[in-house]
Amino acid sequence: MADPSSPIREEIRSIAPYNAGLTLEEVRANHHVEKVAKLGSNENPLGPSPALRRQFPDIGELARLYPDPQGRALCTRLAGSFDVGSDQVILGNGSEDLIAVICRSVVRPGDTVATLYPSFPLHEDYTALMGGKVDRVTVAPDLTVDMKTLLAAISRKPRMLMFSNPMNPVGSWLTPDQLAQLIAGLDPETLIVVDEAYAEYAAGDDYPSAAEMLKATGLNWVVLRTFSKAYGLAGLRIGYGIVSDGSLCGFFNRARTPFNTNAIAQAAALTALDDVGHLNRSVELAIVERERMKKELTTMGYRIAPSRCNFLFIDARTDASGLAGALLRQGVIVKPWKQPGFETYIRVSIGSPVENDHFIEAFQKVEAAG
Ligand SMILES: *Cc1c(COP(=O)(O)O)cnc(C)c1O
């Protein structure tokens, strides 16, 4: 019998399956709990804009026809808000699709891709898939970005620097000054990809729009954004990239599947952009609840990373997988971090007030049971 793994590239065999988290149904069925707080995937407790429920009473034509493969209406709209050409916008089936597209387009065997660490696993996985090597820039002891190590990493002229700002899973971020320092140190041969999945939560003083800062530099760059987080559309799978120039964007377009974003997702994204009130409510809820959770956890004696996101990265001072299992039995889903050096950390999404209370109570119970 043929070995089923024999046709598969070594790079794929060495990647761990993506830890996509648990569904409500799995937790209810396996742990016999009624109420579940789903706080493992950074979703939005308010969900999408109410306008969306009114938008799809009749889904017929959207479902029947192939979508616009370029997603022109959405790209034009996004190009307007970033003040770039619409040929500089690329849509993805989630921004994770675009991470894969970029790595496929750029990373040759043996290339180095630098990233902040602990990292968003897909930044590393798609690099490895293409035969690239990852250069990890570990956070400083206070869990903020270690600029000295980051500048040293880019001075080695990696093929690509790809990281999220703010960082997932940590929540800390590069300030405008730090991003300026980084840009000044980049080699023109290095592609910089800034994954801004949490930009809507982070916006404000002391957080830079990478696209604005990169525009005049003459570097090759991509900024990734998503509708999965603050816009509450994780289930529809739509994200986008803003690219330094139209021809570079054109190459990325060749490396994606032609109809990678569906018609409903494209239409829903446009509706979501129109409802600024809902976006603001989502962001405000996350910030108010994040600060409340942070206070409670700090009072309990835990060390928490600075966060501009809709999640907290907590040093639980115990094996995080064991803790996550105990929380599951109380009906709470969190993400135990499994990357080396951070095995005592959990990442907890900021949910609704009820879900957040559920987490705090469960955490206290588990802690008391020791
Ligand atoms: C959630 C997340 C994504 C994935 O977003 P999708 O658009 O849902 O694929 C990408 N990057 C980071 C850093 C994220 O946290």
Image (spheres, helix red, strand yellow):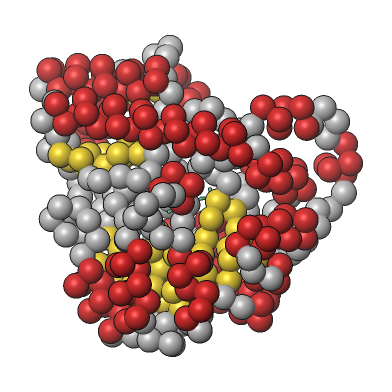
Q: Count up the numbered dots.
A: 0
Q: Nearer the viewer, residue 164 or 370?
A: 164
Horizontal side, residue 223 vs residue 179: left or right: right
Q: Is residue 64 visible?
A: yes
Q: Position of residue 336 (x, y in %)?
A: 28, 40
Q: Position of residue 77 (x, y in %)?
A: 71, 56
Q: Nearer the viewer, residue 92 or 187?
A: 187
Q: Which of the 4 image quadrants contains residue 140?
A: bottom left
182 versus 291 height, above or below: below
For the point 58% across and 46% down, which residue is it? 227
For the point 45% across and 65% down, which residue is it? 210
Horizontal side, residue 28 vs residue 69: left or right: left
For the point 44% across and 29% down, which residue is it? 285
Q: Nearer the viewer, residue 46 or 27?
A: 46
Q: Position of residue 117 (x, y in %)?
A: 27, 60
226 versus 189 height, above or below: above
Q: Is residue 235 visible?
A: no
Horizontal side, residue 100 vs residue 366: left or right: right
Furthest-front residue in view?
205
Q: Position of residue 209 (x, y in %)?
A: 46, 61
For the point 44% across and 87% down, which residue is it? 189
Q: Quadrant of the C terminus?
A: top left
Furthest-top residue in view?
34
